Amino acid sequence: MGSDGKQLPGGKQSAVKSWWQRFLNVGFVAGFLLVLLTYAVVSQQSQRFGPAAVIDSSPDDVAAMSRQAIKAPGEEAAGSAQENGGEEKAETTDTPAEDSADHHHQQQDTSGDSNQDQQQQQQQQEQEWRPKEDRAGVTEEPPKRDDTNAKPFDNGKVVCATAGPYSDTCDVFGDVRTNGTAHTVTLVPATSLPERREWTIKPYIRRSMSGIPEVTITQLDATSEESPAPACTVTHRVPAIVFALGGLTGNYWHDFSDALVPLFVASRRYGGEVQLLVSNIQPWWLGKYEAVVRRLSKYDAVDLDRDDKIRCFPRVTVGLRMHKEFDVVPELAPDGQRLTMTDFTAFLRETYSLPRSAPISLRNQNEDGQRKKPRLMLLHRGHYRKLVNVPEIVKAAEEAGFEVAISDPRFDVKVEELARSVNSFDVLMGVHGAGLTNAVFLPKGAVVIQVVPYGKMEPLARLDFGDPIVDMELRYLEYSITAEESTLLEMLGPDHPVIKDPESVHRSGWDKVAEYYLGKQDVRVDVDRFAPTLALAIDHLRQQ
């Protein structure tokens, strides 16, 4: 029909029909090309912002590459933990730590990340988190910041921290399989990774310690058939921590500094729902500290070296991390816990049911109007660095207003008994040595007096005890003895370099420092010179 409603001739009608078909065909082709162009643009954007694999373990390279591997907001894989491939990475991270000398191995920390980078990483992690269902169907809570930048739901990710002054650790997320007798931890990625990666670390707290078997962490290439993953024989629904005993454990101070404190930091976040895999296992150690270990893990520890099972976990941490000697750096606690030494001491008071959380208050008086005396525990060593004039020290402390008890804890004493005894005191006093470790059982606000041996030993004394004691929220007092108070003076004479020039002894190396100032020296405290220190302790307790 024409525009005026008249019938068109047959030829003209055919021509119009042919022209209209060609128009439709061209439009269809143009539309199809437009769809293809749109698809190509979207694909490029997805590739740009989609999951990326970072496999270089160089800290500088990781920092550069991670800026390119930003996950698109809201992007996640649905389904179970094994189906949640997500962001598959293998990273090595640098973490800040204060420079400090390890008096056993003379190592120093030279690494550090800026606070700004950490804040950006935390913000990115919080933005990326979305609730998901795990294998048990339990919805996860939003994760807190982890110093390794690893998220709890990551599957197919290895994050290793090797830049600290003491320890190497690796966190492995996803389908993780352990072979104890082979000392291997294997990650089976949920999706393809570009290449196979491998790390070897020593799971002991001090990387330079000899005699500790190493553990190999392997990230498999999902596209390769050369090294198939070992089949699971035991499947765990909880994470695992792999660590080694032996080494310096057996020394009371090292039991805490090298094992109990870092184990607390690594495992506390799990509330007991974590499996401990122990290399170089020491049954006596696990027995001595059974109460602590049982509260950190509800499960019997596995002897890793004799475990021939293939155990499968959703997450495995290999190695414990020491922040500082006998101390915790809150900013370095995993998963943003910001744990402190006061958290550790509170945990011990709960573990051993210690009754006192605060020292005596000298402001309170009895009905008869007389003040109760604060109690002072005097640690009396039976060997080197012992106090040679204990009766004089006891008398001076009593004159200052203390009730004094002398303690010489035996190696085989039960920790529960020792903890309850120490907790009943208000002041702990002793020469630099393992006995001062018992400060962990004091009520918060109590006083610790460290008698520092002669020989420029103050930096070591503060590293091992001074800083940790302050971080326990105890009052720390330090009394440094003079050459006249050291038995080295009568042993070597005033002109010997050990007496005359301690700095030269330190320059000669740790062996000479340990031999003379820690190994051959006893202490005769000048009670008149020491009296002001006792007075400071009393003044502090008056302020409680």
Image: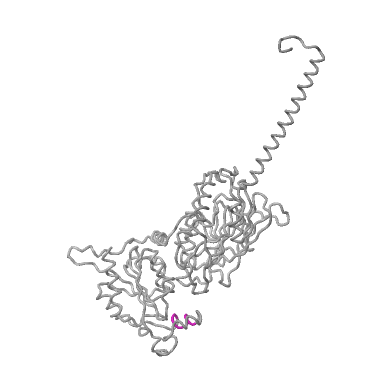
The correct choice, above or below, for 19 with respect to 304 in the image is above
Task: Assign the N terminus to one quadrant of the image.
Answer: top right
Most distant residue in the top direction:
6
User: Magenta residues: mostly which secondary structure?
Assistant: helix
**Residue 138 location (% of width, % of height):** 52, 44
Most distant residue in the front direction:
4
Task: Assign the C terminus to one quadrant of the image.
Answer: bottom left
The reply to whether the magenta stretch includes residue 517 is yes
The correct choice, above or below, for 14 with respect to 278 in the image is above
Most distant residue in the right direction:
11
Q: How many marks?
A: 0
* Quadrant position of residue 494: bottom left
Observer-nearest residue: 52 or 312? 52
**Residue 209 location (% of width, % of height):** 56, 71
| Region in magenta | 512-518
Colour approach in the figure: one colour
Judged left or right of residue 85, residue 282 is left
Q: What residue is rendered at 40% in x and 64% in y?
A: 471
The reply to whether the magenta stretch includes residue 106 is no
Judged left or right of residue 487, residue 160 is right
Observer-nearest residue: 250 or 431? 431
**Residue 84 location (% of width, % of height):** 60, 46
Most distant residue in the left direction:
368
**Residue 306 location (% of width, % of height):** 60, 64
Judged left or right of residue 539, residue 220 is right
Observer-nearest residue: 48 or 455? 48
* Quadrant position of residue 229: bottom right
